[in-house]
Image (tube, coloured by chain):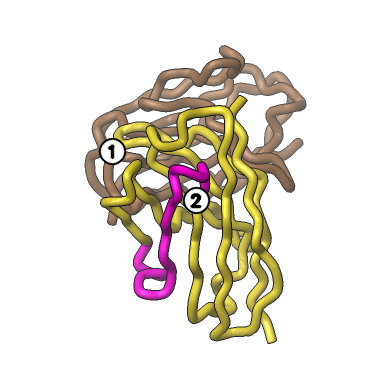
Amino acid sequence: EVQLVESGGGLVQPGGSLRLSCAASGFTFSSYWMSWVRQAPGKGLEWVANIKQDGSEKYYVDSVKGRFTISRDNAKNSLYLQMNSLRAEDTAVYYCAREGLGWPTDYWGQGTLVTVSS
Amino acid sequence: VIWMTQSPSLLSASTGDRVTISCRMSQGISSYLAWYQQKPGKAPELLIYAASTLQSGVPSRFSGSGSGTDFTLTISCLQSEDFATYYCQQYYSFPRTFGQGTKVEIK
């Protein structure tokens, strides 16, 4: 059974940093692209970033470029999102998700809430 | 960036109704379109991919159609468990984008 478990969310002040983690199990982690998708309270889904199987390619939505960094550790079956210079508009539930090239986002974690507020 | 226009944003319907949700792309994406269902407090679940292929375990009352720029999700006979929010997503190019969502509520 595919499982994705996020951690690391919490309350952070504007301008602060936070690192999210996602532990994957139930599939061959190193064979899949992985992504982060977020959802602000009461709002729709926003794709944030993804990373290729070997980490050699990464893509970001414009609103987080230069502030967020996606990474992975295939030996630990883990995905990460380093978030710097956080803003109030980054407040959201962040989902870890599995996807592929030419393949949709097919499995999602339960999400972790990030709140940016003073 | 591929922009998506999903409509309607709110759909009021009754159990047993046939409902249709549309998704229009700013440029052609072949059939690289997926549909998701999300219930309050839960992660989205994949319903349909490649515009019309049902994900394993999804009831056959759900169907998808379209290619290029215009796509449709149809629920043929709405059940109580189908009241939720639905999103389309293109996975033709990066960044991947989602439609704004359609909330299907009880009439």
Which residue does the numbered mark 1 point to in the structure image? B69
Asked whether the residues under the numbered discs 1 and 2 touch, taking CB atoms below 8 Å apart as contact, a structural biologist would say: no
Q: Quadrant of residue B104?
A: top right
Q: Which numbered disc covers residue B78?
A: none
Name the residue at the top extreme: B60
Q: Quadrant of residue B56?
A: top right
Horizontal and vertical percent position of residue A71 = 42, 56
Horizontal and vertical percent position of residue B58 = 59, 18
Q: Which residues are magenta?
A: A61-79
Which residue does the numbered mark 2 point to in the structure image? A79
Q: Is residue A42 visible?
A: no
Label 1 CA crowd tier, 10 Å (few <14, some 14–19, many 20+): some
Looking at the picture, do discs 1 and 2 lie on one chain?
no
Above or below, A13 against A102 in this view is below
Quadrant location of the C terminus of chain A in the rendered image: bottom right
Q: Considering the numbered disc 1 on the image, is that residue within a helix, a strand or a loop?
A: loop
- The chain letter under disc 2 is A
Quadrant location of the N terminus of chain A in the rendered image: top right
Q: Quadrant of residue A49?
A: bottom left
Label 2 amino acid?
A: Leu
Question: Residue at point 45% right, 49% down?
Answer: A73
Horizontal and vertical percent position of residue A81 = 49, 61
Q: Nearer the viewer, residue A66 or A47?
A: A66
Q: Nearer the viewer, residue A80 or B33?
A: A80
- Colour of chain B as rendered: brown
- The chain letter under disc 1 is B
**How far apart are the alpha carbons under marks 1 and 2?**
33 Å
Horizontal and vertical percent position of residue A105 = 46, 37
Chain identity for the colour yellow used in the image: A
Question: Residue at point 38% right, 27% down?
Answer: B51
